Image (spheres, grey):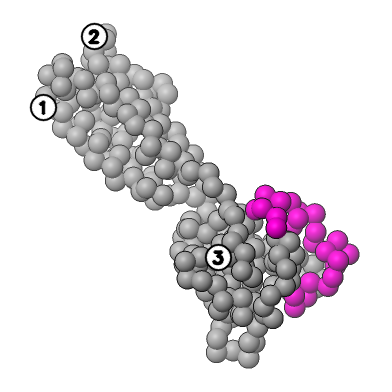
Amino acid sequence: MRDWQETMGWYARNSTTEEIGFDPDGQCLKVCRTARAIPSKYPSAKAAQDATPKKYRVQKVRDLRRGMVLFFDDPNDSNKFGHIVTMVGRVRGGDPDNLHDVLVESNSVVKGKVVVVRGDYFTEHWGDPFQFGATWLNGQELDIPSGVTRVRKFKQGGPAYDVNLLRTAVEHGRHDVQPMIDKINELVGKLPDDEGVNSRVDRFTDYYRRTGILKMGLLHNAVTIGHRTGRVDDIYQALQETIASVPER
C-alpha cells in the first residue's frame, strides 16, 4: 500500500485514462484504491462507506487531512453507489470549517480524467452531501500527515511561546486564533515602559517586538523575584489565560 505522500505523487502523475490505465468515469472507488495500491473489496463507494468503522470516520471539516478519503451520498436519490474522493489539500487562507476550501481529486467531473475540485462540488452539482472523511478504506488503515500543527507547537513551546507560529497558522486558514494574537499584542502593549532601565519587563517587551516570542519566564521572574505587582502581575496573568485559551489542535 502507498503512504499518503506516494499517493499524492500518484495523483500528480495520473490524470488521464492513458495514464491511469483504465477509464475513470464511474470508477471512483477504483481510482481511490488504485491511488493507494489497495486491493478490491467492496462493489461501490456506498458499500465502502457503510463498512467504514466509526473510529476511522472524521466528521468535522477542519479535521480532514491530505490522504483521507471523503464520502458523498444522498441516500434518497436514484444513485445507490455513492461517491468517494481523495483529499489532496486546502485553499491557502481558506476557512478551515468550509468544505468549499478543501481540495479533492475526483473522477466523473471531466470525461475520462481525474481532476482537482473543491470539496463542496458534489453537493452543489450532484446533490450529494458530505458524509465523512476516513482514514480507512477496504479494510486498510490509511496514513495521513502526522506533523504537529503550528498551533499545537505554539502551545507546547512554553515558557517561550512563538507567536509567529500562530501568525503563520492564520495565513494558512486558522482564522480562529487571530483574536488570541490580537489579545497578546494588546496586553504586551500595556506593559510599563521601562526603556533604558534594562528591567525584566523591558527585556520581555523588547524581545517580543524583535522576535515575536513571549519569554514568559522573564515576566514570571519580574513578578516573583522583582516584586512587580499591580499592572505587571495583572498582565502576566492575562497573558497566561490567553495562551491557555489557544486551541490544542
Quickly name the residue at label 1.
230
Q: Depth-wise, is mark 2 or mark 3 nearer the camera?
A: 3
Tell which of 20 and 111 is nearer to you: 20
Quickly name the residue at label 3.
134
Tell me whether circle 1 and circle 2 mark residues in contact (CB < 8 Å).
no
Up/down of 200 relative to 17, above or below:
above
Label 1 neighbour load within 10 Å: few <14, some 14-19, many 20+: few
Picture coordinates of residue 97 (x, y %)?
46, 60
Check disc 1 and give the amino acid type.
Answer: Gly
Picture coordinates of residue 109 (x, y %)?
72, 72
Quickly name the residue at label 2.
197
Q: Earlier in the sequence, mark 1 or mark 2?
A: 2
The residue at 46%/41% (across/down) is 150
Tell which of 107 and 53 is nearer to you: 53
Left-right relation of 220 to 149:
left
The residue at 35%/27% (across/down) is 160
**As drawn, which residue projects farthest toward the right?**
18
Give the Cα separation between the discs numbered 1 and 3. 51 Å
Check disc 3 and give the amino acid type.
Answer: Ala
Left-right relation of 107 to 73:
right
Residue 130 seen in the figure:
no
Magenta range: 1-28
Check disc 2 and give the amino acid type.
Answer: Val
